[in-house]
Image (cartoon, grey):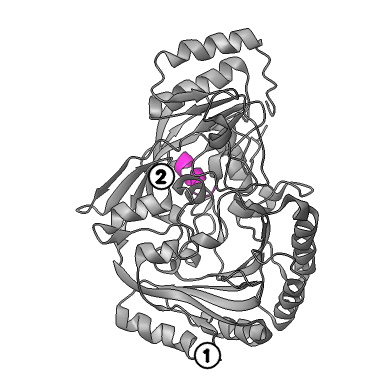
């Protein structure tokens, strides 16, 4: 099994191979000395500061194939970038090859069949803009600058998941460039084992060049927004959130958060963000319950475009901010868990940080644990300790706060982990825990399609030997 590539080819042979490939490559190669390299190499998380030896900015599938072949012949480690939002920095690599899909922006929507195909460099904001022209949507990220590729392959939390399941549950097919440079279509009818694996198994099986989604009638106007309370009311807000989510309809998705005030004042707040994709009248009734609870200091809930809902939180997650996240699925949102969250957030050192509780229910929780590789199918709550700051001088205390808060919550967590939130500084193999009963089957499929573990800069699944 090959886990690391040190670039054993000489510098001259690497330069010659890249120069030869550039004759037919329709995208762009960037080296550290090139003008655009410094900007392109950056990913969303400013805490990640890696320097690839070469960035292959692909414009089509042929470019991706050539980039994979170049990495193989030159024995280079490979990272694949779609939107570049992965907080652990898996979209980039030191001294290896970054296969950058961000120039691949093609989107085609077929309103007759209610399907949409999009290339691997598309973001959710771009995807939603095209599908909403036809009054259609599929479950996507809650921050519009997130790429469709990484989010879908690892799960796909979004505003529509109660009604239509996770992003991966809406996949009809995926086009993959495999470790040997081949091109495969994975669907229910083609390479069905691979299709099962990519729905949750991340980037372990190839470069996802394009995705075909089922899309659904949504909007263009829905109900959604944010309602915030003083932090002194956090206990009551979180208990109310628990009560509301116990009977939330499929049309509604809710997130509770302890966060800093959006005006940058540094004030701590307790908030609920909500979206309702059903009939407006039903949404107004459901949202009224949130709006009339307690004494809100901010209420933005109302009629909003679906695209507007998906950009609502963008300003709170700027590119280049320093991020460190810890996450786990909660057994339940008990009183003791609520008290522990509040105690932890009282010590939060950055106004950009927060503790989020994402509600899983509805269609996302009605799919069998082994129907896809993604096993997190219980109704309940996903905890995210999200530490975010701007000044590198604050690195130690902001990282320590996240670790200490996460540690304090350990008595309340269950077995499940959301793989897209996995970090790289944990002992053992967090992927094994995240995939649970599906892990061995994923290892078997990995051994079939990537026996050398060529694609390993990801939430890695080592091939079964």
- Boundaries of the magenta span: 193-201
Q: Residue at x 38, y 65 (%)?
A: 308
- CA gap between label 2 and label 1 equals 39 Å
Q: Which mark is residue 293?
A: 1
Q: What is the count of numbered marks? A: 2
Percent of width and height locating residue 427: 79, 48
Of 38 and 24, which appears nearest the observer?
A: 38
Drawn side of residue 16 relative to residue 190, left or right: right
Q: Main secondary structure of the magenta part?
A: helix
Drawn side of residue 410 relative to residue 248, left or right: right
Q: Quadrant of the N terminus?
A: top right
The residue at which mark 2 appears reads as: 122
Of 394 and 281, which appears nearest the observer?
A: 394
Query: In the figure, residue 106 lies in which quadrant?
Result: top left
Q: Residue at x 49, y 56 (%)?
A: 156
Residue sitting farthest toward the left: 112
Secondary structure found at label 1? loop
Residue 9 inside the magenta-drawn segment: no
């Amino acid at each position: 099994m090959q886990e690391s590539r040190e670039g054993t080819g000489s510098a001259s042979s690497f330069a010659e191979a890249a120069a030869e490939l550039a004759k037919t490559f329709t995208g762009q190669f960037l080296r550290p000395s090139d003008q655009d390299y410094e900007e392109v190499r950056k990913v969303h998380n400013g805490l990640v500061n890696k320097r690839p030896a070469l960035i292959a900015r692909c414009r089509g599938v042929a470019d991706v194939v050539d980039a994979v072949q170049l990495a193989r012949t030159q024995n280079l480690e490979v990272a694949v970038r779609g939107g570049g939002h992965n907080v652990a920095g898996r979209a980039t690599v030191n001294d290896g090859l970054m296969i950058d899909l961000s120039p691949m922006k093609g989107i085609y929507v077929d309103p007759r069949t209610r399907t949409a195909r999009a290339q691997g460099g598309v973001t959710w904001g771009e995807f939603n803009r095209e599908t909403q022209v036809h009054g259609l949507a599929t479950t996507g990220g809650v921050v519009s600058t997130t790429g469709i590729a990484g989010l879908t392959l690892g799960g796909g939390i979004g505003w529509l998941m109660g009604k239509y399941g996770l992003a991966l549950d809406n996949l009809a097919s995926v086009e993959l460039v495999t470790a040997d440079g081949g091109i495969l279509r994975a669907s229910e009818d083609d390479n069905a084992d691979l299709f099962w694996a990519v729905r949750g198994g991340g980037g372990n099986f190839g470069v996802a060049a394009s995705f075909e989604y089922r899309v659904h009638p949504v909007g263009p106007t829905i109900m959604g927004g944010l309602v915030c309370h003083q932090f002194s009311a956090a206990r009551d807000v979180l208990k109310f959130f628990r009560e509301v989510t116990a009977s939330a309809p499929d049309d509604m998705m809710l997130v509770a958060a302890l966060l800093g005030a959006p005006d940058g004042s540094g004030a701590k707040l307790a908030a609920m963000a909500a979206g309702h994709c059903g009939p407006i009248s039903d949404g107004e009734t459901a949202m009224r319950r949130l709006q009339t609870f307690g004494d809100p200091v901010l209420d933005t809930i109302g009629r909003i475009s679906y695209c507007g809902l998906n950009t609502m939180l963008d300003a709170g997650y700027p590119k280049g901010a320093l991020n460190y996240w810890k996450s786990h699925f909660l057994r339940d949102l008990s009183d003791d868990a609520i008290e522990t969250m509040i105690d932890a957030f009282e010590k939060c050192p950055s106004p950009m940080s927060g503790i989020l509780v994402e509600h899983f229910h509805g269609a996302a929780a009605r799919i069998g644990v082994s129907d896809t590789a993604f096993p997190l199918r219980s109704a309940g709550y996903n905890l995210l300790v999200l530490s975010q700051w701007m000044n590198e001088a604050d690195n130690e205390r902001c990282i320590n706060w996240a670790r200490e808060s996460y540690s304090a919550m350990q008595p309340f967590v269950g077995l499940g982990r959301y793989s897209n939130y996995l970090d790289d500084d944990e002992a053992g193999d967090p992927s094994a825990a995240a995939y649970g009963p599906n892990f061995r089957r994923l290892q078997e499929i990995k051994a079939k399609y990537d026996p050398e573990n060529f694609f390993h800069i990801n939430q890695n699944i080592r091939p079964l030997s």
